[in-house]
Amino acid sequence: MKDDIRRLARLRRLEKIRAIARQNAALEAAQAESTLSRLRDLSDRTRRMADDYGSRREMRDGAALHQVGRFVGGLQAIRRTTDGDTLRARAIADAKQQLLAEAERRRAAVEERAILQERSIAKAGKTPALGSRKRSGTGLE
């Protein structure tokens, strides 16, 4: 009985540890999603700026046209870099979501084992119901 109680206490400690690990995984997943969102926004803003500057036609001379062309080319290069960063951030965010799901599964498994252990202890602690006893001896007595 004492071993069962010790095992239950160990399972409860392990459950707390797994809950903390799940919290950390959730925080990391949220941070990764936030980074992904910011990169998407940056990519969209850069694209809009490049489109806006690229569609301008009110240049006074060739030098101004050349300068705007270089600026738009720079914005497009930034956007391509940001798009690559966004793909990497998406992969990281997906991986963090998987780690979060695994952490939750591990926590739930320990919780389930602890509940089963509690039931086992409760069941062992109950006194059996006394029913009719089997007669001993022979019917000749």
Image: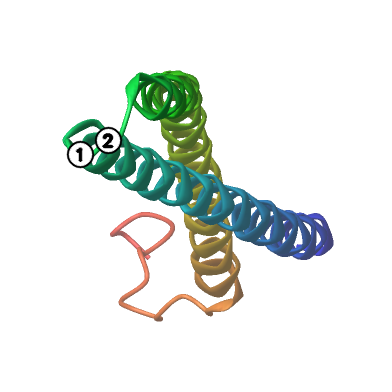
Within 10 Å of disc 1 (Cα), the crowding (few <14, some 14-19, many 20+) is few
| In this view, the mark in front (1 or 2) | 2
Dot 2: element = loop
Question: In the rendered view, would you say 43 is above or below 30?
Answer: above
The quadrant where residue 114 appears: bottom right
Number of marks drawn:
2
Residue 80 image offset from top left, x and y in percent: 41, 19
Name the residue carrying label 1.
56
| Quadrant containing the N terminus in the rendered view | bottom right
Q: With 70 as the anchor, is 26 left or right in this view? A: right
The residue lying toward the viewer, choosing from 87 and 42, is: 42
* Residue depicted at x 71% and y 61%: 8
Residue type highlighted by circle 1: Arg
Question: In the rendered view, would you say 10 is above or below 40?
Answer: below
Name the residue carrying label 2.
59
Dot 1: element = loop
Chosen colour scheme: rainbow
Query: Label 1 to label 2, Cα distance in Å?
Result: 8 Å
Residue 64 image offset from top left, x and y in percent: 40, 30
The residue lying toward the viewer, choosing from 25 and 33, is: 33
Residue 4 image offset from top left, x and y in percent: 73, 58
Residue 66 image offset from top left, x and y in percent: 40, 19
Q: With 56 as the anchor, is 109 left or right in this view? A: right
Q: Mark 1 near mark 2, Cβ–Cβ under 8 Å?
A: yes
Residue type highlighted by circle 2: Met
Question: In the rendered view, would you say 75 is above or below 42?
Answer: above
Q: Which mark is residue 11?
A: none
| Quadrant containing the C terminus in the rendered view | bottom left
